[in-house]
Image (tube, helix red, strand yellow):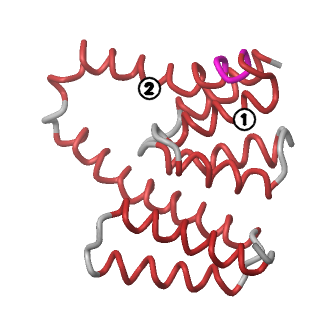
Amino acid sequence: MLLQLFMSFAKIGAFTLGGGYAMVPLIQEEVVEKKKWIDKEEFLDILAVSQSTPGALAVNMSVYIGYRLKGILGAVFAALGCVLPSFLSIIFIAAFLTNFLDYKYVKKFFQGAGPAVAALILYSAIKIGKTKKFKWYYYIITVLTVLLMFFKFDPIVIILASAILGIFIRGEKNGI
């Protein structure tokens, strides 16, 4: 199982351009759809917790999933699988490819990869949105968040305000 964790996250890490958010649909496909290690609801919880904690989203998710499945060793193997491909790629690029970054086709590759990454992130958001049962207060928090972003509020203030609003609404609902 430890080797499976490592290989699954190494595959995800090796074939994802664009960082953590671009990895979300691949992680979901691998751990929810293919391997069935966790269900969709737990995946959404892991995603929320991983976004709320310091560090890279994909690494946080890999650590949480690895820990959930196999404890500390699972977390270590999953995290190593997630970061090792990027680490090796950066070493390779730094050592050999920095001279090629000005070539026309290399630039065109990165220009094409950017929109693809944005599409993957949008696809993931839509897929996650379809699986979650939305409550009325989700819409209120979403609209308020967009408004605060529009008025250029600090993202930390937005996150804290959303968390407090969620606690208040859920607390009222549960009689707390």
Q: Nearer the viewer, mark 2 or mark 1?
A: 1
The residue identified by callout 1 is 65
The reply to whether discs 2 and 1 touch (Cβ–Cβ < 8 Å) is no
| Quadrant containing the C terminus in the rendered view | bottom right
Q: Which residue is mark 2?
A: 86
- Alpha-carbon span between mark 2 and mark 1: 19 Å
Residue in view at x 52 percent, y 66 percent: 122
Task: Determine the residue positioned at 65% across, 83% down.
Answer: 137
Q: Which residues are magenta?
A: 73-77
Disc 2 residue type (three-letter): Ser
Residue type (three-letter) at the residue carrying disc 1: Ile
Mark 2 vs mark 1: which is more N-terminal? 1
Answer with left or right where residue 135 lies relative to residue 51.
Answer: right
Q: Residue at x 41, y 20 (%)?
A: 87
Question: Residue 115: horizontal and vertical position, in percent?
Answer: 38, 59
Residue at 80 percent across and 56 percent down: it is 40
